[in-house]
Structure formats: structure tokens, C-alpha cells
Image (spheres, rainbow, N blue to C red):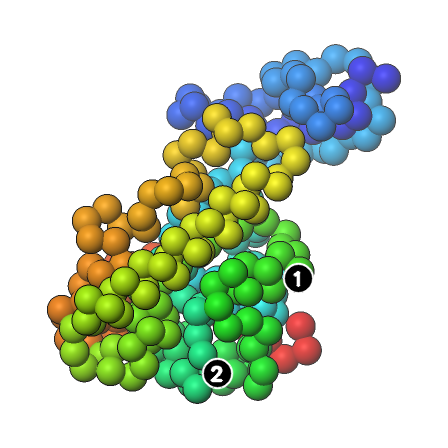
Amino acid sequence: MDFDLVIRGGTIMDGTGRPGVRGDVGIRDGRIVAVGEAKGAAAQTVDAGGLVVAPGFIDVHTHYDAQVMWDRMLTISPWHGVTTVVMGNCGFGVAPTRPDHRGLIMRTLEKVEGMSLAALEAGLGEKWPFETFPEYLDAVERRGTALNVAVLLGHTPLRLYVMGEEATERPATDDEIARMRALVREAIGRGRDRLRDLEGVHPHRLRGQAGAEPGRPVRRDRGPGRGAGRRGTGHRPGHPSAATCSSRSSRASPGPPAGR
Ligand SMILES: [Zn+2]
């Protein structure tokens, strides 16, 4: 058998920016071994006539942080050819979150990201399966996802976790900034360990991926203390991050979560 799989007759967009060409893609032992012509016998053939065959897209700006808890498909990204998502953008996320702050975190996602509060409450349930950021990563991993997932630690939950509701009222103290930095270091360490555990992943393939480089702060200027002096950081619908989010078509809007 020459191929395990041949995708025949599709319009191949190879990711280089060249115009698409009609042809075949041959796969053997989990690798693409032919592009354009794939002559020979195949264990499986897929007719891609009239369809586009393309590498998976990486969406570096999504907000699936809550949705991933009830929708392992990360709807609707796969529908559009996305195979890797980066979530936790714009400083928002669901971890770390103390039980007392769950309502506030969900209302933040409702206000700033336009998510349905009812969907968030139904999807996340009464008892969230995590509190710390490492516990969140574990929870995501336990459930499994249809796509590759990279997670950023959001400034908003981090501040709320350390400062409580005063996070929206005053700048962080030096001690609080130090605690936030320690939590960021812990989160980066957890991500680094996970990358180390990945079988068959070579370091050069990880370079340039968001959040993949160990030892680098999540933000380049002042680390987790950035923005500490701004009143209401992360809780005003009109702040610049929110505007960025609203312009994104890939924004995750939780669909009806009940029973799914
Ligand atoms: Zn965003």
C-alpha cells in the first residue's frame, strides 16, 4: 500500500500564500508524503472535489476559557478549519478563581465578551472543577479537547484572586504584585512541565507558539503588575481590550450548554 490516506481532487492551499491548485494529498504513517500528485494505492480515499484542503489554522485570539468546560469541540472553530486555539486573551479567563468570585468572573465575561450569563452558569455549574490555574489546566486536560489548546493566564482573574473585590477599586500593593508574580511563575511552570511531557514534540516546533516559551513573563513590561494602577482594569465594557474582542469574528459565544 502506497498511502494510508489520499485526499483526492481538492483545491490545495499549502499555507505558503500561493494560489490554490487542484490535486491530491497523500498521507503515510501519519505524515504528508505527497502533495499535488498521489499516484498509487491507498487504504482510504477521501473525495475532496469542490472543497479546499488546507493546513489547520491557529486562532491566537479566542475566549473558550469557560466553554471548554462543556464543549470539547470548541464550537465553532473546527467548522472553519481551526486546529489550534489560544484562549485566555485580553486579560480575561476563569482561573484562578475563588468560589466566592465565580459570579463576578462570569458577569465580567458577560459584560466584556458578550457571553450569555445563563449559558455560563449552566455550563460551568455550581461547583467548578478548579480554583487555581494549574487545577484549571488539569481540568481542561481531563476533559480533552478536539483541538490543540494553549491557555493564557488572564490579568483580571489573577488580580481578583489576590486582591479580592478591591481589584477594581485601587492599585495593587507591592506585596500583592509579588503574590501575583508567584502565581504567574507557578502557572508558567505548570505549562512548561506539560510541554515537557508531550511525547514526540520537538522544542523547535514549539518556538513562537503563544505561551510556549518557559521563563518568559506573560507581559513584557512589568509582568503581572502591569495596569495595577488603573482603576477598574478589566471590568469596564469600554476599555481597549474589549474593543479588540468585539471586533473578532472568532469570539466564542457560548451556545446552549444544557446537556451537551
Ligand atoms: Zn479578546
Label 2, ligand 1: CB separation under 8 Å: no
Q: Which amino acid, mark 2?
A: Pro
Q: Nearer the viewer, residue 87 or 207?
A: 207
Q: Nearer the viewer, residue 70 or 176?
A: 176
Q: Position of residue 155 (x, y in %)?
A: 31, 64
Residue named by callout 1: 143
Image quarter in which the N terminus is found:
top right
As measured in the structure, the alpha-carbon distance from the residue carrying label 2 to the one carrying label 1 is: 21 Å
Residue drawn at 60 percent across, 64 percent down: 139
Residue drawn at 48 percent across, 68 percent down: 132
Q: Nearer the viewer, residue 227 or 21?
A: 227
Q: Is residue 94 left or right of residue 76?
A: left
Residue named by callout 2: 99
Residue drawn at 67 percent across, 17 percent down: 33
- Residue 105 is at least partly visible in this image: yes
Q: Is residue 201 left or right of residue 235?
A: right
Q: Is residue 257 above or below residue 85?
A: below
Q: Is residue 101 left or right of residue 44?
A: left
Q: Position of residue 255 (x, y in %)?
A: 53, 72
Residue drawn at 60 percent across, 36 percent down: 51
Mark 1 secondary-structure assignment: helix
Find residue 245 and report its image quarter.
bottom left
